[in-house]
Amino acid sequence: MPITNPSGARDPGEYRRLWAWELKQTGWSQVKIAEALGVTEGAVSQWCKAAREGGVEALLTRKAPGPPPKLTKEQKSKIPALLLLGAEHYGFQGERWTCKRVGVVIQRHFDVKYHHSHISKILVELGWSPQRPTHRSNARDDEKVEQWVDERWPEIKKSQGKGPNNSLG
């Protein structure tokens, strides 16, 4: 019997479970299935029982659920209203929302701490996006930046499109 990918299996374990079930449906014994697939008879027995009781879906690979979320759905839904009060309402200088600032607000209101890199995922989930940080490098020389914008940037723009891979983006 040629080996195919039964039911579009996504990984080797799922493939074996689905194949075992298909072979069982065609009349193969559990011993023969175990030999053909290189697994134990006990494994075949467990798979067949699972398929009989829960259908083919019981043989499919399921994604691990991961840890429970730190914030409830209700708490997450309150975040936009908190942010609409503005960053200065919470004592920050300037109205920009950064992930770190949002994290501080979440910790103050819900006593839940997230790493700032995870905050952006929460914001995207809520339809928001983090804004640029408010701090600038201490070594920044505004005069040199302005000179670069006035002199060098026009040269770069002119050279755009004059060859392959000249994209600035």
Image (cartoon, helix red, strand yellow):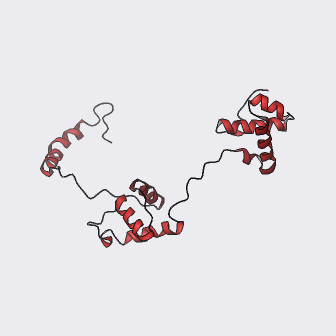
Q: Residue at x 80, y 40 (%)?
A: 45
Residue 138 location (% of width, % of height) = 18, 52
Q: Quadrant of the C terminus?
A: top left
- The quadrant of the image that shows the N terminus is top right
Q: Nearer the viewer, residue 102 or 44?
A: 44
* Residue for point 74% across, 33% down: 39
Q: Tell me where residue 146 appears, x and y as whole percent.
A: 15, 49
Identify the image quadrant of residue 154: top left
Q: Quadrant of residue 36?
A: top right
Identify which residue, 161 or 3, lies in the foreground: 3
Residue at the outermost top position: 2
**Position of 28 compared to 13: left or right?**
right
Question: Is residue 61 at least partly visible in the picture?
Answer: yes
Q: Is residue 121 above or below residue 12?
A: below
Q: From the viewer's perspective, is 158 left or right of 19?
A: left
Q: Examine the rendering and report whether any part of residue 6 can be seen.
A: no
From the top left corner, tell me how far across and down residue 113 is, in percent: 43, 61
Is 154 above or below relative to 31?
Answer: below
